Structure formats: structure tokens, C-alpha cells
Amino acid sequence: MTAADYVASRLDGHKPMVGIVLGSGLGKLAEKIEDKIVIPYKEIPGFPVSTAIGHKGNFIAGYLGGKPVIAMQGRFHYYEGYTMELVTLPIRVMKVLGIQYLFVSNAAGGVNFDFKVGDLMVITDHISHLPNPLIGPNMPEFGPRFPDMTRPYDLDLRKKAFEIAADLGITLKQGVYFAGTGPSYETPAEYKYFRLIGGDAVGMSTIPEVIVARHSDIPVFGMSVITNEAHDDYAEDYVNDGDDVVVAADAAADRMTTLFTELIASL
């Protein structure tokens, strides 16, 4: 039995319209899903397991904003030692299950000097220093050999997000997400470099999933929660800490959850 067959067998006829990927410390949104069906990754044939801090490791299906969804409560990362095929396997599974939209989130460092801890950044574009997940034989049943990436993050969803945020009194930033391999945090010189080449926030995930979704022509909405200031002018005793990142993400997760819920409700 394939991973998609197994997940479908557990969904009892539930057909998700929206797939959601929840990053470090952002699993709180999954608690808002109604009529939930929880499928631990460890039970799915051929599936890896999450080892990163703040990633619980479950598929959660149900309803959010009145729409059928399936959420990844924790994702997989290249730095965990998984191949890109495994990192992006859940997106392929969700495509087979029939999702029409993909919402992705992550915890990220703000290299833009205007960003503060707790800000929500709508991702407008990205720069990747990760291996492309489409390297290797093409899977024509999903998409073309050379998929277009002119608009990786859907313009209509981004516009609608800002309209909803304004109605809710939620302030949003927007910018370019840069992803490296990790797992070490970047040096101050690297943060400066990312800023100079056009990055606004930096992390270690998300882009592979977005590429695979766009290969399958799935519209994507992406959001980064700024969990630390990724600058090159730190005090001498400053230290980046993974636990602090999860705490900062958790503090912003309620606003992100509200925005995702209303945006999904509007689809």
C-alpha cells in the first residue's frame, strides 16, 4: 500500500480541499481543526518522522473555516538527513488526495532591519540554496519537466490575505524568503549577504514543498513568523537558540491561525 492509499483509507471519505504545512512552533493551528482525524507519520508506509524541535509529526484532517483540510503538524527537513524525495513526499500525497490549495508556514529569522520578533511576513518570492526537489526523472503524472516559477506564491491569495488582515486589525509584512540547508544557524556575514541579495527572512525549509506544489499547478500561500532578528550587528554575548525560536513562534501562532482560518473560509 502506498502512503497516499494508506492516508486515504484513514480519512473515511474526507476529501481535503486545502493542504497546510505547519512549521516550528506553529502546530497550534492544528488544534483549531474540527472533527479531526489524526494520523501519526510513523504509521504511514514509507513515511519519515519529524525530528526537529517543535514538530509533532502528524497528519490532521478535518475542517477549518468550514472547509475540508489536511494539515502537516510538523514537516521534514533536508538537514534531518532525508532526501528531497522524502522531504516533499507529503505534498505529493496531498496532491493525490485532491488538495486545490497549499498553505505553508515557517519560523524564520528577519534579515530585513524593519522586521521585529513576532511579525508575520507574507512570502512574495523566494531564493533557494537547497537542492531542487525536481532533480531526477520527471513525474509527468504530476507536472512538466520545466515548471514555471514566475509566481510561486499566488497573487490572489496574497491580496486577499492583506484585505482580511486589515479587517481583523492584524499587521502584515511581506517579503522574500531565503532558505539554506541548516542545521547550523547562519553567521552574521551570511545574514548580511542574504539581505544584500534580496532576502527579507531566512530559514531552512518551505521552498522544496512550494516547488513540488507548483510543479503540480497547486496555488500556494506562504507565511513566515519572524522569530529572531537575523542581523550582522549583534551584541558580543548574543546566541541564537532553537528553543527561543519555538517560544516566539508560539506567541505569534494565534494571529497566524486566525488569518489562515479566515483566508481558507473565503475560498
Image (spheres, grey):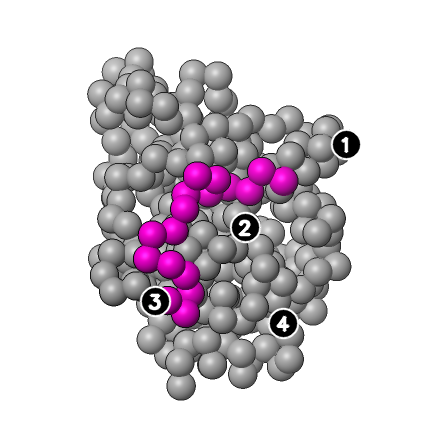
The answer to whether 110 is drawn above or below residue 26 in the figure is above
Q: Residues within 10 Å of mark 4 (few under 14, many from 20)?
A: some
Residue identifier under label 1: 167
* Magenta residues, dominant SS class: loop
Instruction: State how far apart marks 4 and 1 are (Cα).
Output: 30 Å
Q: Secondary structure at mark 4?
A: loop
Classify 10 Å Cα crowding around label 3: few (below 14), some (14-19), many (20 and above).
few
Residue 15 is marked as 4
Q: Is residue 261 magenta?
A: no
Q: Earlier in the sequence, mark 1 or mark 2?
A: 1
Secondary element under disc 3, as helix, strand or loop, is loop
The answer to which image quadrant residue 9 occupies is bottom right
Quadrant housing the N terminus: bottom left
* Residue range corresponding to the magenta coloring: 139-156
What residue would you read off at disc 3? 139
User: Which residue carries the number 2 mark?
Assistant: 219
Q: How far apart are the two marked residues, 2 and 3, measured between alpha carbons?
A: 19 Å
For the residue marked with disc 4, what is the amino acid? Lys
Residue drawn where x is 57% and y is 55% of the image: 101
Please report contact status of discs 3 and 4: CB closer than 8 Å, yes or no: no
Q: CA distance from mark 2 to mark 4?
A: 17 Å
Viewer-proximal residue, 127 or 63? Answer: 127
Nearer mark to the viewer, of 4 and 1 = 4
The numbered disc on residue 16 is none
Question: From the viewer's perspective, is residue 12 above or below residue 90?
Answer: below
Report how far apart the C-alphas of labels 1 and 2 lie in the structure.
23 Å
